[in-house]
Amino acid sequence: MNKMKNLKQITPLLRGVGGVLITLLTLFTSEQCFSQNYADKVYYLVDSLDLDALTEDDKKLIETSLKEYYKAKDDTSKIKALNYICENMMHNDWSKYQFYQHEIIQKALIKNPSSSIKKSLLFSLASALNNIGYIYHIQGYIPKALEYYHKSLTIQEEIADKSGISQSLSNIGTIYKGQGDIPKALDYNYKSLKIREEIGDKKGIAVSLNNIGIIYKGQGDVYKTLENFHKSLKIYEEIGDKSGAAISLNNIGSLYSAQGDIPKALEYYHKSLKIEEGVGNKKGIALSLNNIGGIYNKKGELLKALECYNQSLKIREEIGNKVGIANSLINIGALEIEQGMFASAEINLQRSLKLAREVGSPKWISISSSHLSSLFKKQGKHQLAMQLYELYIQMRDSINNEATQKATAQQEAKYAYEKQKTIDDAEHNKQLAIEQESKAKQKV
Protein backbone atom coordinates (compact mmCIF):
# COMPACT_ATOMS: atom_id res chain seq x y z
CA MET A 1 0.00 0.00 0.00
CA ASN A 2 1.04 3.55 -0.44
CA LYS A 3 1.12 4.20 3.27
CA MET A 4 2.60 1.14 4.95
CA LYS A 5 4.99 2.81 7.35
CA ASN A 6 5.60 -1.54 6.20
CA LEU A 7 3.66 -2.92 6.72
CA LYS A 8 2.53 -1.08 7.06
CA GLN A 9 -1.11 -3.56 5.82
CA ILE A 10 -5.41 -0.07 2.73
CA THR A 11 -13.41 0.64 0.04
CA PRO A 12 -18.74 3.35 -0.47
CA LEU A 13 -17.11 6.80 -0.89
CA LEU A 14 -17.03 8.73 2.37
CA ARG A 15 -20.30 10.37 3.23
CA GLY A 16 -20.29 12.76 6.11
CA VAL A 17 -16.51 13.09 6.27
CA GLY A 18 -16.84 15.19 9.41
CA GLY A 19 -18.24 12.19 11.29
CA VAL A 20 -15.31 10.05 10.25
CA LEU A 21 -12.86 12.74 11.33
CA ILE A 22 -14.49 12.89 14.75
CA THR A 23 -14.10 9.12 15.08
CA LEU A 24 -10.44 9.28 14.18
CA LEU A 25 -9.77 12.21 16.49
CA THR A 26 -11.13 10.11 19.34
CA LEU A 27 -8.55 7.44 18.54
CA PHE A 28 -5.72 9.86 19.15
CA THR A 29 -7.15 11.69 22.18
CA SER A 30 -5.00 9.81 24.71
CA GLU A 31 -1.90 10.83 22.81
CA GLN A 32 -2.81 14.50 22.73
CA CYS A 33 -4.29 15.19 26.17
CA PHE A 34 -0.91 16.00 27.69
CA SER A 35 -0.19 18.90 25.32
CA GLN A 36 -2.06 22.11 24.63
CA ASN A 37 -0.09 23.57 21.73
CA TYR A 38 -2.66 22.96 19.02
CA ALA A 39 -2.10 24.34 15.54
CA ASP A 40 -4.44 26.93 14.05
CA LYS A 41 -7.06 24.99 12.08
CA VAL A 42 -7.60 27.83 9.59
CA TYR A 43 -4.00 27.57 8.35
CA TYR A 44 -3.21 23.92 9.12
CA LEU A 45 -6.56 22.70 7.68
CA VAL A 46 -7.24 19.98 10.29
CA ASP A 47 -8.51 19.89 13.87
CA SER A 48 -6.37 19.28 16.97
CA LEU A 49 -2.96 19.08 15.32
CA ASP A 50 -0.66 18.95 18.35
CA LEU A 51 2.58 20.70 17.35
CA ASP A 52 4.39 19.58 20.52
CA ALA A 53 3.79 15.94 19.60
CA LEU A 54 5.43 16.30 16.16
CA THR A 55 9.08 15.74 15.32
CA GLU A 56 11.04 18.54 13.66
CA ASP A 57 11.02 16.55 10.41
CA ASP A 58 7.22 16.29 10.48
CA LYS A 59 6.84 20.01 11.23
CA LYS A 60 9.14 20.90 8.33
CA LEU A 61 7.27 18.51 6.02
CA ILE A 62 3.90 20.06 6.92
CA GLU A 63 5.15 23.64 6.55
CA THR A 64 6.73 22.92 3.15
CA SER A 65 3.65 21.09 1.88
CA LEU A 66 1.24 23.79 3.08
CA LYS A 67 3.27 26.51 1.33
CA GLU A 68 2.80 24.54 -1.92
CA TYR A 69 -0.88 24.02 -1.08
CA TYR A 70 -1.57 27.74 -0.65
CA LYS A 71 0.42 28.62 -3.79
CA ALA A 72 -1.58 26.10 -5.84
CA LYS A 73 -4.10 27.51 -8.32
CA ASP A 74 -5.99 24.29 -9.06
CA ASP A 75 -7.32 21.27 -7.20
CA THR A 76 -4.81 18.85 -8.73
CA SER A 77 -1.87 20.84 -7.38
CA LYS A 78 -3.49 21.15 -3.95
CA ILE A 79 -4.05 17.40 -3.83
CA LYS A 80 -0.44 16.78 -4.82
CA ALA A 81 0.82 19.13 -2.07
CA LEU A 82 -1.22 17.32 0.59
CA ASN A 83 -0.03 13.98 -0.75
CA TYR A 84 3.50 14.75 0.49
CA ILE A 85 2.09 14.84 4.02
CA CYS A 86 -0.10 11.75 3.58
CA GLU A 87 2.76 9.64 2.27
CA ASN A 88 5.69 10.86 4.38
CA MET A 89 4.51 12.17 7.75
CA MET A 90 5.39 9.73 10.54
CA HIS A 91 3.05 10.88 13.33
CA ASN A 92 -0.46 9.39 13.46
CA ASP A 93 -1.97 12.78 12.63
CA TRP A 94 -1.16 12.17 8.97
CA SER A 95 -4.53 10.40 8.90
CA LYS A 96 -6.31 13.74 9.44
CA TYR A 97 -4.67 15.11 6.31
CA GLN A 98 -5.58 11.94 4.44
CA PHE A 99 -9.27 12.40 5.15
CA TYR A 100 -9.02 16.10 4.30
CA GLN A 101 -7.31 15.31 0.99
CA HIS A 102 -9.93 12.67 0.21
CA GLU A 103 -12.69 15.28 0.67
CA ILE A 104 -10.96 17.66 -1.78
CA ILE A 105 -10.61 14.88 -4.38
CA GLN A 106 -14.33 14.09 -4.15
CA LYS A 107 -15.30 17.75 -4.59
CA ALA A 108 -12.93 18.09 -7.56
CA LEU A 109 -14.53 15.10 -9.29
CA ILE A 110 -18.01 16.59 -8.85
CA LYS A 111 -16.91 19.61 -10.92
CA ASN A 112 -16.98 17.42 -14.05
CA PRO A 113 -13.32 17.92 -15.09
CA SER A 114 -11.79 17.03 -18.47
CA SER A 115 -10.97 13.37 -19.12
CA SER A 116 -7.23 13.82 -18.49
CA ILE A 117 -7.78 15.66 -15.18
CA LYS A 118 -10.43 13.13 -14.18
CA LYS A 119 -8.00 10.27 -14.69
CA SER A 120 -5.40 12.04 -12.55
CA LEU A 121 -8.01 12.62 -9.84
CA LEU A 122 -9.05 8.96 -9.95
CA PHE A 123 -5.40 7.94 -9.42
CA SER A 124 -5.33 10.19 -6.36
CA LEU A 125 -8.71 8.91 -5.16
CA ALA A 126 -7.58 5.27 -5.38
CA SER A 127 -4.45 6.14 -3.41
CA ALA A 128 -6.46 7.99 -0.78
CA LEU A 129 -8.94 5.13 -0.40
CA ASN A 130 -6.02 2.72 -0.07
CA ASN A 131 -4.50 4.83 2.71
CA ILE A 132 -7.83 5.17 4.51
CA GLY A 133 -8.13 1.38 4.34
CA TYR A 134 -4.71 1.21 5.99
CA ILE A 135 -5.83 3.59 8.75
CA TYR A 136 -8.75 1.31 9.56
CA HIS A 137 -6.52 -1.75 9.19
CA ILE A 138 -3.95 -0.75 11.82
CA GLN A 139 -6.74 0.39 14.16
CA GLY A 140 -8.37 -3.03 13.89
CA TYR A 141 -11.51 -2.05 11.98
CA ILE A 142 -11.16 -4.93 9.54
CA PRO A 143 -14.53 -4.76 7.69
CA LYS A 144 -13.94 -1.04 7.07
CA ALA A 145 -10.39 -1.72 5.90
CA LEU A 146 -11.58 -4.34 3.42
CA GLU A 147 -14.32 -2.01 2.20
CA TYR A 148 -11.82 0.73 1.34
CA TYR A 149 -9.21 -1.64 -0.09
CA HIS A 150 -11.83 -3.09 -2.46
CA LYS A 151 -13.10 0.36 -3.43
CA SER A 152 -9.52 1.38 -4.22
CA LEU A 153 -9.07 -1.81 -6.27
CA THR A 154 -12.24 -1.10 -8.30
CA ILE A 155 -10.96 2.33 -9.34
CA GLN A 156 -7.48 0.99 -10.12
CA GLU A 157 -9.00 -1.63 -12.43
CA GLU A 158 -11.14 1.07 -14.07
CA ILE A 159 -8.09 3.21 -14.91
CA ALA A 160 -5.84 0.17 -15.63
CA ASP A 161 -3.33 1.06 -12.91
CA LYS A 162 -1.47 -2.25 -12.66
CA SER A 163 0.86 -1.08 -9.92
CA GLY A 164 -2.10 0.07 -7.82
CA ILE A 165 -4.01 -3.15 -8.53
CA SER A 166 -1.10 -5.27 -7.31
CA GLN A 167 -0.83 -3.16 -4.15
CA SER A 168 -4.52 -3.46 -3.30
CA LEU A 169 -4.46 -7.22 -3.93
CA SER A 170 -1.50 -7.49 -1.57
CA ASN A 171 -3.25 -5.44 1.12
CA ILE A 172 -6.41 -7.54 0.90
CA GLY A 173 -4.28 -10.70 1.08
CA THR A 174 -2.65 -9.38 4.26
CA ILE A 175 -6.05 -8.96 5.91
CA TYR A 176 -7.17 -12.48 4.98
CA LYS A 177 -3.90 -13.85 6.31
CA GLY A 178 -4.51 -12.06 9.61
CA GLN A 179 -7.99 -13.58 9.76
CA GLY A 180 -6.61 -17.07 9.18
CA ASP A 181 -8.22 -17.44 5.73
CA ILE A 182 -5.14 -18.98 4.10
CA PRO A 183 -6.71 -19.92 0.72
CA LYS A 184 -7.83 -16.32 0.11
CA ALA A 185 -4.58 -14.91 1.47
CA LEU A 186 -2.55 -17.00 -0.98
CA ASP A 187 -4.90 -16.28 -3.87
CA TYR A 188 -4.58 -12.50 -3.47
CA ASN A 189 -0.83 -12.58 -2.81
CA TYR A 190 -0.08 -14.76 -5.84
CA LYS A 191 -2.27 -12.55 -8.05
CA SER A 192 -0.33 -9.55 -6.76
CA LEU A 193 3.03 -11.26 -7.36
CA LYS A 194 2.08 -12.17 -10.93
CA ILE A 195 1.21 -8.56 -11.83
CA ARG A 196 4.37 -7.23 -10.18
CA GLU A 197 6.49 -9.64 -12.19
CA GLU A 198 4.69 -8.55 -15.38
CA ILE A 199 5.46 -4.85 -14.78
CA GLY A 200 8.95 -5.41 -13.35
CA ASP A 201 8.14 -3.95 -9.93
CA LYS A 202 11.12 -5.29 -7.97
CA LYS A 203 10.14 -3.79 -4.63
CA GLY A 204 6.61 -5.11 -5.04
CA ILE A 205 7.95 -8.57 -5.92
CA ALA A 206 10.03 -8.54 -2.72
CA VAL A 207 6.94 -7.58 -0.67
CA SER A 208 4.88 -10.38 -2.22
CA LEU A 209 7.63 -12.94 -1.63
CA ASN A 210 7.82 -11.89 2.01
CA ASN A 211 4.06 -12.16 2.41
CA ILE A 212 3.95 -15.60 0.81
CA GLY A 213 6.91 -16.71 2.96
CA ILE A 214 5.02 -15.71 6.09
CA ILE A 215 2.03 -17.81 5.00
CA TYR A 216 4.26 -20.85 4.38
CA LYS A 217 5.83 -20.33 7.80
CA GLY A 218 2.38 -20.53 9.35
CA GLN A 219 1.85 -23.80 7.47
CA GLY A 220 5.14 -25.23 8.78
CA ASP A 221 6.88 -25.42 5.39
CA VAL A 222 10.43 -24.46 6.39
CA TYR A 223 12.02 -24.87 2.96
CA LYS A 224 9.45 -22.75 1.11
CA THR A 225 9.52 -20.14 3.87
CA LEU A 226 13.27 -19.68 3.81
CA GLU A 227 13.35 -19.72 0.01
CA ASN A 228 10.85 -16.85 -0.24
CA PHE A 229 12.46 -14.79 2.56
CA HIS A 230 15.96 -15.05 1.05
CA LYS A 231 14.68 -14.18 -2.44
CA SER A 232 12.99 -11.15 -0.96
CA LEU A 233 16.09 -10.08 0.98
CA LYS A 234 18.25 -10.37 -2.14
CA ILE A 235 15.94 -8.07 -4.11
CA TYR A 236 15.76 -5.49 -1.32
CA GLU A 237 19.56 -5.41 -1.11
CA GLU A 238 19.84 -5.08 -4.90
CA ILE A 239 17.56 -2.03 -4.98
CA GLY A 240 18.98 -0.50 -1.78
CA ASP A 241 15.72 -0.65 0.19
CA LYS A 242 16.88 -0.69 3.82
CA SER A 243 13.45 -0.88 5.45
CA GLY A 244 12.48 -3.78 3.20
CA ALA A 245 15.74 -5.60 3.94
CA ALA A 246 15.07 -5.17 7.67
CA ILE A 247 11.67 -6.84 7.27
CA SER A 248 13.21 -9.81 5.47
CA LEU A 249 15.96 -10.10 8.09
CA ASN A 250 13.33 -10.13 10.83
CA ASN A 251 11.38 -12.82 9.02
CA ILE A 252 14.45 -15.01 8.55
CA GLY A 253 15.28 -14.54 12.23
CA SER A 254 11.77 -15.65 13.21
CA LEU A 255 12.18 -18.86 11.23
CA TYR A 256 15.52 -19.67 12.90
CA SER A 257 13.91 -18.92 16.26
CA ALA A 258 11.09 -21.36 15.52
CA GLN A 259 13.70 -23.99 14.66
CA GLY A 260 15.56 -23.39 17.92
CA ASP A 261 18.67 -21.88 16.32
CA ILE A 262 19.09 -19.11 18.91
CA PRO A 263 22.44 -17.60 17.74
CA LYS A 264 21.22 -17.32 14.13
CA ALA A 265 17.89 -15.83 15.18
CA LEU A 266 19.54 -13.23 17.42
CA GLU A 267 22.02 -12.35 14.67
CA TYR A 268 19.25 -11.61 12.16
CA TYR A 269 17.08 -9.75 14.70
CA HIS A 270 19.91 -7.44 15.69
CA LYS A 271 20.77 -6.76 12.03
CA SER A 272 17.14 -5.82 11.47
CA LEU A 273 16.94 -3.62 14.58
CA LYS A 274 20.06 -1.69 13.58
CA ILE A 275 18.58 -0.88 10.17
CA GLU A 276 15.15 0.05 11.58
CA GLU A 277 16.73 2.44 14.09
CA GLY A 278 18.77 3.98 11.29
CA VAL A 279 15.69 4.76 9.20
CA GLY A 280 13.44 5.59 12.16
CA ASN A 281 10.78 2.95 11.44
CA LYS A 282 8.90 2.67 14.75
CA LYS A 283 6.78 -0.29 13.70
CA GLY A 284 9.90 -2.20 12.64
CA ILE A 285 11.79 -1.23 15.81
CA ALA A 286 8.91 -2.54 17.95
CA LEU A 287 8.84 -5.81 16.02
CA SER A 288 12.60 -6.36 16.35
CA LEU A 289 12.55 -5.56 20.09
CA ASN A 290 9.66 -7.96 20.58
CA ASN A 291 11.51 -10.71 18.73
CA ILE A 292 14.76 -10.12 20.62
CA GLY A 293 12.74 -10.32 23.84
CA GLY A 294 11.52 -13.73 22.71
CA ILE A 295 15.10 -14.94 22.29
CA TYR A 296 16.09 -13.72 25.78
CA ASN A 297 13.00 -15.52 27.10
CA LYS A 298 14.14 -18.78 25.50
CA LYS A 299 17.60 -18.29 27.02
CA GLY A 300 16.04 -17.84 30.44
CA GLU A 301 17.12 -14.19 30.74
CA LEU A 302 13.68 -13.08 31.88
CA LEU A 303 14.49 -9.54 33.00
CA LYS A 304 16.05 -8.72 29.61
CA ALA A 305 13.08 -10.34 27.89
CA LEU A 306 10.57 -8.31 29.90
CA GLU A 307 12.49 -5.10 29.20
CA CYS A 308 12.36 -5.73 25.45
CA TYR A 309 8.68 -6.68 25.55
CA ASN A 310 7.76 -3.50 27.45
CA GLN A 311 9.81 -1.30 25.09
CA SER A 312 8.03 -2.91 22.15
CA LEU A 313 4.60 -2.49 23.79
CA LYS A 314 5.23 1.20 24.48
CA ILE A 315 6.07 1.90 20.82
CA ARG A 316 3.11 -0.12 19.55
CA GLU A 317 0.74 1.81 21.81
CA GLU A 318 2.25 5.08 20.55
CA ILE A 319 1.52 4.18 16.93
CA GLY A 320 -1.84 2.49 17.67
CA ASN A 321 -0.89 -0.93 16.29
CA LYS A 322 -3.60 -3.18 17.81
CA VAL A 323 -2.23 -6.46 16.45
CA GLY A 324 1.25 -5.58 17.72
CA ILE A 325 -0.13 -4.55 21.13
CA ALA A 326 -1.94 -7.90 21.40
CA ASN A 327 1.30 -9.72 20.55
CA SER A 328 3.34 -7.81 23.15
CA LEU A 329 0.70 -8.31 25.85
CA ILE A 330 0.67 -12.06 25.22
CA ASN A 331 4.44 -12.22 25.63
CA ILE A 332 4.37 -10.16 28.84
CA GLY A 333 1.44 -12.18 30.24
CA ALA A 334 3.09 -15.52 29.49
CA LEU A 335 6.28 -14.35 31.22
CA GLU A 336 4.30 -13.17 34.25
CA ILE A 337 2.66 -16.60 34.55
CA GLU A 338 6.14 -18.17 34.77
CA GLN A 339 7.03 -15.72 37.54
CA GLY A 340 3.82 -16.35 39.47
CA MET A 341 2.44 -12.84 38.83
CA PHE A 342 -1.04 -14.22 38.13
CA ALA A 343 -3.13 -11.07 38.67
CA SER A 344 -1.04 -8.95 36.29
CA ALA A 345 -0.83 -11.81 33.78
CA GLU A 346 -4.61 -12.15 33.68
CA ILE A 347 -5.07 -8.40 33.04
CA ASN A 348 -2.58 -8.43 30.16
CA LEU A 349 -3.88 -11.63 28.59
CA GLN A 350 -7.54 -10.59 28.85
CA ARG A 351 -6.68 -7.30 27.18
CA SER A 352 -4.79 -9.18 24.48
CA LEU A 353 -7.73 -11.50 23.85
CA LYS A 354 -10.09 -8.51 23.61
CA LEU A 355 -7.83 -6.80 21.03
CA ALA A 356 -7.42 -10.04 19.07
CA ARG A 357 -11.20 -10.38 18.85
CA GLU A 358 -11.55 -6.74 17.79
CA VAL A 359 -9.18 -7.22 14.87
CA GLY A 360 -10.56 -10.68 14.06
CA SER A 361 -7.26 -12.55 14.32
CA PRO A 362 -7.65 -16.32 14.94
CA LYS A 363 -3.90 -16.61 15.55
CA TRP A 364 -3.79 -14.17 18.47
CA ILE A 365 -7.18 -15.31 19.82
CA SER A 366 -5.77 -18.84 19.85
CA ILE A 367 -2.53 -17.90 21.63
CA SER A 368 -4.22 -15.58 24.16
CA SER A 369 -6.85 -18.15 25.06
CA SER A 370 -4.20 -20.89 25.39
CA HIS A 371 -2.22 -18.86 27.95
CA LEU A 372 -5.37 -17.84 29.81
CA SER A 373 -6.44 -21.48 29.98
CA SER A 374 -3.08 -22.41 31.53
CA LEU A 375 -3.37 -19.53 33.99
CA PHE A 376 -6.89 -20.47 35.13
CA LYS A 377 -5.82 -24.10 35.50
CA LYS A 378 -2.98 -23.04 37.82
CA GLN A 379 -5.50 -20.99 39.84
CA GLY A 380 -7.91 -23.92 40.11
CA LYS A 381 -10.55 -22.23 37.94
CA HIS A 382 -11.17 -25.39 35.95
CA GLN A 383 -14.42 -24.40 34.21
CA LEU A 384 -12.89 -21.19 32.87
CA ALA A 385 -9.75 -23.09 31.92
CA MET A 386 -11.82 -25.59 29.90
CA GLN A 387 -13.78 -22.83 28.11
CA LEU A 388 -10.60 -21.01 27.08
CA TYR A 389 -8.97 -24.29 26.01
CA GLU A 390 -11.92 -25.06 23.74
CA LEU A 391 -11.61 -21.57 22.21
CA TYR A 392 -7.88 -22.18 21.66
CA ILE A 393 -8.56 -25.50 19.87
CA GLN A 394 -11.30 -23.95 17.74
CA MET A 395 -9.08 -21.06 16.58
CA ARG A 396 -6.01 -23.25 16.09
CA ASP A 397 -7.91 -25.69 13.89
CA SER A 398 -9.45 -22.87 11.85
CA ILE A 399 -5.96 -21.72 10.88
CA ASN A 400 -4.19 -24.98 10.16
CA ASN A 401 -6.54 -27.64 8.81
CA GLU A 402 -6.29 -30.09 5.95
CA ALA A 403 -8.36 -27.94 3.56
CA THR A 404 -6.05 -24.99 4.18
CA GLN A 405 -2.93 -27.04 3.46
CA LYS A 406 -4.46 -28.35 0.24
CA ALA A 407 -5.34 -24.81 -0.81
CA THR A 408 -1.74 -23.76 -0.18
CA ALA A 409 -0.45 -26.44 -2.55
CA GLN A 410 -3.14 -25.62 -5.14
CA GLN A 411 -2.30 -21.91 -5.17
CA GLU A 412 1.40 -22.64 -5.57
CA ALA A 413 0.72 -25.05 -8.45
CA LYS A 414 -1.64 -22.55 -10.09
CA TYR A 415 0.97 -19.79 -9.88
CA ALA A 416 3.73 -22.04 -11.26
CA TYR A 417 1.47 -23.19 -14.14
CA GLU A 418 0.41 -19.66 -15.09
CA LYS A 419 3.99 -18.40 -14.93
CA GLN A 420 5.22 -21.23 -17.17
CA LYS A 421 2.28 -20.72 -19.54
CA THR A 422 3.21 -17.04 -19.90
CA ILE A 423 6.78 -18.06 -20.81
CA ASP A 424 5.54 -20.74 -23.25
CA ASP A 425 3.08 -18.32 -24.90
CA ALA A 426 5.84 -15.76 -25.34
CA GLU A 427 8.09 -18.37 -26.97
CA HIS A 428 5.22 -19.54 -29.19
CA ASN A 429 4.44 -15.98 -30.33
CA LYS A 430 8.11 -15.37 -31.00
CA GLN A 431 8.30 -18.52 -33.14
CA LEU A 432 5.17 -17.51 -35.08
CA ALA A 433 6.67 -14.10 -35.78
CA ILE A 434 9.86 -15.72 -37.13
CA GLU A 435 7.84 -18.05 -39.37
CA GLN A 436 5.67 -15.18 -40.67
CA GLU A 437 8.76 -13.08 -41.41
CA SER A 438 10.29 -16.05 -43.26
CA LYS A 439 7.16 -16.54 -45.36
CA ALA A 440 7.03 -12.85 -46.21
CA LYS A 441 10.64 -12.98 -47.44
CA GLN A 442 9.88 -16.04 -49.56
CA LYS A 443 6.96 -14.18 -51.23
CA VAL A 444 9.24 -11.26 -52.03
Image (cartoon, rainbow, N blue to C red):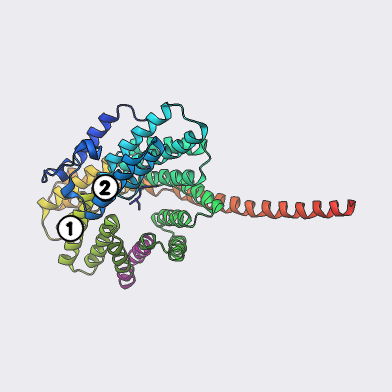
Q: Residue furthest right?
A: 443
Residue type at mark 1: give it.
Asn
Number of disc labels: 2
**Of discs 1 and 2, which sits in the foreground?**
2
- Judged from the image, the secondary structure of the residue bearing numbered disc 1 is helix
Magenta part of the chain: 247-267
| Residue at mark 1 | 310
Instruction: Answer with left or right where residue 94 lies relative to residue 422.
Output: left
User: Magenta region's main secondary structure?
Assistant: helix
Which residue is at the front of the view, 409 or 144?
Answer: 144
- Judged from the image, the secondary structure of the residue bearing numbered disc 2 is helix
Which residue is at the front of the view, 60 or 223?
Answer: 60
Residue 12 visible in the snapshot: no
Mark 2 Cα within 10 Å, few/some/many (few <14, many 20+)? some
Taking the magenta stretch, the answer to whether it contains residue 255 is yes
Residue 264 visible in the snapshot: yes
Does 385 sit above or below residue 264? Answer: above
Does 152 sit above or below residue 88? Answer: above
Residue type at mark 2: give it.
Glu
Residue at mark 1 to residue at mark 2: CA–CA distance: 34 Å
Residue 77 is situated, as x and y percent measured from the top left of the image, at: 39, 40
| Residue 63, numbered circle | 2
Residue visible at 11% across and 45% down in the picture: 35
Q: Earlier in the sequence, mark 1 or mark 2?
A: 2
Residue 184 is situated, as x and y percent measured from the top left of the image, at: 45, 43
Does 179 sit above or below residue 285? Answer: above
| Residue 228, numbered circle | none
Residue 334 is situated, as x and y percent measured from the top left of the image, at: 19, 56
Taking the magenta stretch, the answer to whether it contains residue 197 is no
